[in-house]
Image (tube, rainbow, N blue to C red):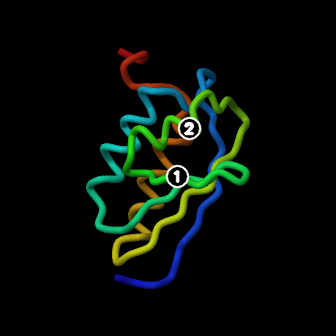
């Protein structure tokens, strides 16, 4: 596993915030990567692969920002994919 921690600041754009549905999509996707994933808001740092811990950053509304950290062999790919989930302006279920 690579020792370097990659970080990306993301802005929440979904008008309903980073609530349960996008959080569960985030966790499901995060678990597909080998890297460790951490989500940070202010002084709070949680495991991005844990639904229970990720709930601690719930009700974070736009234009709030989070920092996603990834450490491991696929860290760059993980950051790209996970940032897209957080920064999605709407949810696919609402578009149907």
Q: Residue at x 67, y 29 (%)?
A: 61
Q: Going 56% across and 31% down the picture, which residue do you hit?
A: 89
Relative to 39, is 12 on the left or the right? right
- For the residues marked 1 and 2, what is the alpha-carbon distance in whole angstroms? 8 Å
Left or right: residue 42 versus residue 78 is right
- Decide which of tag 1 and tag 2 comes sooner along the chain: 1
The mark found on residue 3 in the picture is none
Q: Secondary structure at mark 2?
A: helix
**Residue sitting at 34 percent across and 78 percent down?**
73
Residue under circle 1? 46
Asked which quadrant contains residue 35, the reply is bottom left
Q: Which mark is residue 56?
A: 2
- Numbered label tally: 2
Residue 41, compared with residue 96, is above or below; it is below
Q: Nearer the viewer, residue 54 or 63?
A: 54
Residue furthest left in the image? 32
Where is residue 75 drawn, in percent x and y? 42, 70
The crowding category of the residue bearing disc 2, from other C-alpha atoms within 10 Å (few below 14, some 14 to 19, many at least 20), is few
Given contact means CB atoms under 8 Å apart, are the residues at marks 1 and 2 in contact?
A: yes
**Residue 4's spot in the image, x, y percent?**
50, 82
Q: Is residue 68 above or below residue 57?
A: below
């Amino acid at each position: 596993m690579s020792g370097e921690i990659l970080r990306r600041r993301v802005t929440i754009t979904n008008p309903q915030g980073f609530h349960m549905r996008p959080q569960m999509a985030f966790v499901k996707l995060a678990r597909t990567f080998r890297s460790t994933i951490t989500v940070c808001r202010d002084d709070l740092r949680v495991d991005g692969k844990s639904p229970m811990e990720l709930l601690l950053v719930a009700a974070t509304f736009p234009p709030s920002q989070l920092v996603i950290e990834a450490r491991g062999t696929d860290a760059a790919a993980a950051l790209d994919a996970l940032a897209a989930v957080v920064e999605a302006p709407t949810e696919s279920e609402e578009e149907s």
